[in-house]
Amino acid sequence: MTWRKLIIQVPCFNEEQHLAVTLQELPRQVRGVDEVEILVIDDGSTDRTAEVARLNGADYILHFSNNRGLARAFRAGLDACLRLGADLIVNTDGDNQYYAADIERLIKPLIDGQAEMVVGDRDPRNVKHFSVYKRLLQHYGSWVVRWLSGTEIPDTTSGFRALTRDAAMRLNVITDFTYTLETIIQAGKKKLPITHVAVTTNPERRGSKLFQSLWEYVKRSAATIVRIYAMYEPLKVFSYLGGAMIVAGLLPGLRFLYFYLSGDGGGHLQSLMLTVLLIIIGFQTVLIGLVADLIAANRSLIEDVLFRIRRIELGEQSTGIESIPKPDDTPQSRAQGGRS
């Protein structure tokens, strides 16, 4: 397969201080692709982020009038890259966290046909500017995501990742918090070939804008994981919950049975009532899981239809994306070229 165009998307929110360095270090020629372009997603910045992008080589800018969050910026960036004809898409951060020269290494499994999604592994255990608590959270959080998704990605929170055109069309980011965990779980459940490569990080330039504290990050990430997993494995989730309630209901039932056989059952009717209540709730929870599983099957069909619709619509021109003319691509130069 010929990989014609690679688009590097850079979601930004108030990155005036760091974006210039990020854009200047992004490669303009990458082995295996014919053309490299850069898309900056300006997520409602209130500083000079858009102006810095124009002055430092961005080919396109996607503007949001207000801040919508990283997940929505990532999702909008994928849609924009697809409409702009990208065969491969690389996502990187605007604060120059990732070493731009690793992009060639990042997309190699895609070019070789070994995967449709590649995640850059920062080796969080050895990242110097990560605190001990953050390293532990990264380690155990990534283990949970690997277990739930059935993948082998060691650094699940890395935003440095590459996707093929088909993979970008199949992923549907739902959360408003962060796309990193959700897309890996989706890729695993949709059986998309996904792998990882070792990448390098640059020295830290600023703290995270995604969360104010580790506790907030853990809380919101856990909610995202539970929500996405329940979407793709609802019967399993509700069966576990219903089964736990049924088992919990059997315990007071056994207690009542013991006293009943001992001739003192009349004084422990509350145990029997609790048993009946918990078992009923448990069976209802399992039944909810069955209904949710049917809904999930329908959602899978809808996602397939959405994938086909996207392929049809991608022939249309996108709107809301600013194309930045190059010095030799001004209206005057095109007019002169036409006259000659």
Image (cartoon, helix red, strand yellow):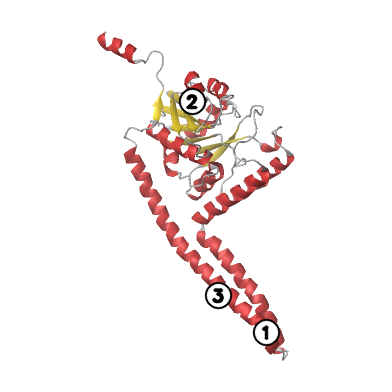
Total marks shown come to: 3
Horizontal and vertical percent for residue 205?
65, 27
In the picture provided, is 120 more to the left or to the right than 292?
right
Pointer 3: what residue?
280
Q: Please report the residue visible at 36 percent of the width from the left and 15 percent of the height from the top.
A: 330
Q: Can residue 184 be seen in this view?
A: yes
Image vertical order of residue 242 relative to residue 314, above or below: below
Q: What element carries label 1?
A: helix
Q: How far apart are marks 3 and 1 (CA)?
A: 18 Å
Q: Is mark 3 on a helix, strand or loop?
A: helix
**Three-letter amino acid code at the position of disc 2:** Ala
Upstream in sequence: badge 3 or badge 2? 2
Pointer 1: what residue?
257
Pointer 2: what residue?
50
Say whether marks 3 and 1 touch (CB < 8 Å). Answer: no
Q: Please report the residue visible at 55 percent of the width from the left and 21 percent of the height from the top.
A: 20
Pair 3/2: label in front = 2
Horizontal and vertical percent for residue 189?
50, 50
